[in-house]
Structures are given as C-alpha cells and as structure tokens.
Image (cartoon, helix red, strand yellow):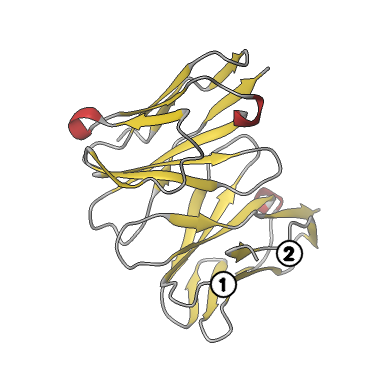
Amino acid sequence: EAGVTQFPSHSVIEKGQTVTLRCDPISGHDNLYWYRRVMGKEIKFLLHFVKESKQDESGMPNNRFLAERTGGTYSTLKVQPAELEDSGVYFCASSQADSGNTIYFGEGSWLTVV
Amino acid sequence: QKEVEQNSGPLSVPEGAIASLNCTYSDRVSQSFFWYRQYSGKSPELIMSIYSNGDKEDGRFTAQLNKASQYVSLLIRDSQPSDSATYLCAVNRASSASKIIFGSGTRLSIRP
C-alpha cells in the first residue's frame, strides 16, 4: 500500500512567487493534516481536513496560505505570494476516521524562498 | 510556555545502554501521547503511543505516562547506533482524530 506522497520534494522559488504543494494521503484516509517545520523550530500544525471539509485551520499563519481538498482526496497547499519566512519543510499526514489517532506522515516538501 | 517541551539535546548514550527521553506538556486535558522518530531528512515515524498512566512496552521501547505530573518519557533499552535520530514527543487533546502538537524534539546519538 502506498504511503502519504507529497510533491514536489524540493522547491526553490523567489520571494513574491507562488508555490503549490500537493499531498496524496493514504487511500481511504478521511483525515488529512498539513504541518510545517521551519529551521530550528518544532513541527507546527497548520490545518486539518476531514474529507473535503476544513475541520481546524487555526494553525494557518496568514491569508497568503490557501489549502484545498476538493473531492476529499488529494490536497493542495498554495503559498501566494511567498515570503522568506515561509521557507521550511511542509509535511502532510493522514489517518483513518477511527484510527486511534495514528497518523502517517509523508516525506515532506522542502521549500526554500530566496 | 510551550505546549510540549523537550530538551533539544544532543543526548549521547553508549551503545547497549538505556536512553531516556523526557517530555512535559502544559494542557491538563491532553489525552493521547506519542513518540515519533525522525531521521535526518526523513518524515516522522510513529514508534509509540500511550493513552493511560503507567508504562507501555514494545520491544526495546517503553513509554511512561504520568498525567498528574504532565510528564511522558521514552526509554530505549540496549541502544543501537541505528537509534540515533531526533525523537519527537507529541500530544493530542482529544480522543478523536484532531491536531497533534509536537515538541521540538530531542536529538539522540548512540556512540559505539
């Protein structure tokens, strides 16, 4: 069974540009999470989807970040316009509806804004 | 105060010894507790979860939870060089699937 997959694995963009990160959760997982780790800091929660609905988006840093999960399958996280402080690793994770909270992480998308 | 606190390390332990990793959390209503292992450049991997006070053992790993003290720990027996990684403590307030809050991680180094 395929795990959580993320694309791109690495991205280098200039300040002001737009980047869209994609996450394909494990098939059948209703819960999808986005997390971010910036250099030297802890992994921080961004938001949580249950199927196509945003359950909790309290961690989204500002309105330059937009997450979608149309159809309740894959999700995208768009950063527009990107700023230097957005650099970091963006992790996607997923879990089943009643998994006892076991969530599985993707390998992450490493974003560098220059 | 951070919601989940860990000593960043590095913690250096000789091969074959017991590695002890500690974590405290601030929210008393927290219900679920996790230890993730993360190798450099890789994604976090769940190694232990614990939900009730006491010890939970899985192979060489033992998780310990003390809700009164808001403290959770991970013991690794017979430490191996392959255990060298960053260990992330994570906490969930609710019993259902919801956001998990991570500590900043403790870097563990097992020296041969």
The residue lying toward the viewer, choosing from A39 and B89, is A39
Front residue of B41 and A76: A76
The disc at residue A60 is: none
Q: Quadrant of residue B78?
A: bottom right
**Residue A40, position as x, y percentages in the image:** 71, 43
The alpha-carbon separation of the residues under discs 2 and 1 comes to: 33 Å
Q: Residue A4 at x, y = what percent?
A: 38, 35
Vertical order, B8 against B18 (above or below)? above
Say which residue appears at 44% left-offset and 36% top-offset: A106
The mark nearer the N terminus, 2 or 1, is 2
Residue B76: percent from left, percent from top = 63, 66
**Mark 2 lies on residue:** B16
* Quarter of the figure with the C terminus of chain A: top right
Q: Secondary structure at mark 2?
A: loop
User: Which residue position holds label 1?
Assistant: B26
- Amino acid type at circle 1 is Ser
Q: Residue furthest front?
A: A63
Report the residue at 57% width, 47% height from top. A43
